């Protein structure tokens, strides 16, 4: 379940335009192509944008595999190789465990292909929330906005 105005996966012009697929062994695959709009140093991706891409990939993993509303409580990233403009990062994410409302996920991003060199690793704790989280803290009509723009039906399960 998602939202077309989401910076990570929505249709906003300046967004990341990420798409997610659930593959074998419950691994969730996402791709993020670094453009000139994502630069930090000349010709290189900004680390914060990469962290955002992993927040999206990991949040989508929670959404795809558990189908429960949850928000990021903690996100850790290891930047192990620079990611040049024009590179597509292939992100593979996994659900590591669930303890009550706490959901643990991790991912690694590889340069240029699914078996390329690892450039970024990330781990996150998502916390399951009720729908009132969105209506209380976000827009009061958040649920209608989710429903009217969701692209859940476009998610591919085990293609
Ligand atoms: C029709 C509607 C459907 C909606 C469905 C949506 C599905 C989504 C699907 C697809 C997603 C796509 C991708 C999205 C990607 C982007 C996601 C984001 O960017 S989310 C925005 C950024 N994050 C926030 O804004 C959170 C702000 N923080 C909070 O609201 C609260 O702090 C919250 C909810 C995280 C926790 O607050 P508490 O009061 O509910 O719960 P407490 O008791 O504090 O925590 C619960 C447990 O979690 C641990 N915890 C919480 N935060 C922690 C932290 N930072 N580090 C370690 N542990 C933490 C606590 O210690 C506690 O653990 P113990 O149960 O006691 O063992």
Image: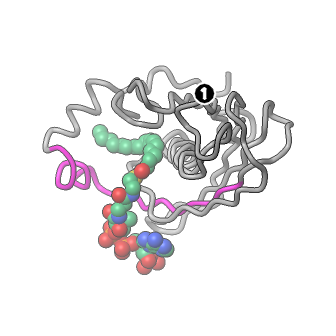
Question: What residue occupies the far front of the structure in this picture?
Answer: 42
- Residue 59 visible to the viewer: yes
Q: Is residue 110 left or right of residue 127?
A: right
Residues 21 and 110: in front is 110
The answer to which image quadrant residue 28 occupies is top right
Question: What residue occupies the far bottom of the structure in this picture?
Answer: 99
Residue 93 appears at what percent x and percent y? 66, 46
Residue 47 appears at what percent x and percent y? 60, 51
Q: Is residue 70 left or right of residue 55?
A: left
Q: Is residue 1 left or right of residue 44?
A: left
Residues 44 and 52: in front is 44
| Residue 101 is inside the magenta segment | no
Using the image, determine if residue 31 lies above or below residue 140: above
- Residue 70 visible to the viewer: no
Few, some or many residues within 10 Å of mark 1 (<14, 14–19, 20+): some
The answer to which image quadrant residue 30 occupies is top right
Please report the bounds of the magenta region as a residue range.
121-139
Q: Mark 1 sits on what residue?
A: 157
Residues 87 and 97: in front is 87
Using the image, determine if residue 141 lies above or below residue 106: above
Residue 26 appears at what percent x and percent y? 68, 41
Using the image, determine if residue 3 lies above or below residue 96: above
| Residue 137 is inside the magenta segment | yes
Determine the residue positioned at 13% across, 44% down.
Answer: 140
Q: Quadrant of the N terminus?
A: top left
Ligand 1: image quarter: bottom left
Q: Quadrant of the C terminus?
A: top right
Residue 35 appears at what percent x and percent y? 60, 29
Determine the residue positioned at 55% across, 37% down.
Answer: 38
Q: Is residue 77 left or right of residue 99?
A: right
Say which element carries label 1.
strand
């Amino acid at each position: 379940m998602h939202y077309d105005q989401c910076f990570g996966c929505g249709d906003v012009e300046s967004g990341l335009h990420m798409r997610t697929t659930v593959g074998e062994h419950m691994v969730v695959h996402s791709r993020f192509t670094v453009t000139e709009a994502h630069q930090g140093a000349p010709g290189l991706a900004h680390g914060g944008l990469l962290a955002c891409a992993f927040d999206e990939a990991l949040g989508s993993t929670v959404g795809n595999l558990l189908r429960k509303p949850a928000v990021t409580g903690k996100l850790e990233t290891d930047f192990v190789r620079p990611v040049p403009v024009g590179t597509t990062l292939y992100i593979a994410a996994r659900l590591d465990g669930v303890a009550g409302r706490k959901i643990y996920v991790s991912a690694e991003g590889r340069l240029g292909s699914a078996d390329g060199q690892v450039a970024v690793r990330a781990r996150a704790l998502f916390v399951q929330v009720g729908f009132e989280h969105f209506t209380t803290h976000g827009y009061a009509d958040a649920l209608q906005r989710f429903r009217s723009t969701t692209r859940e039906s476009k998610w591919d399960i085990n293609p």
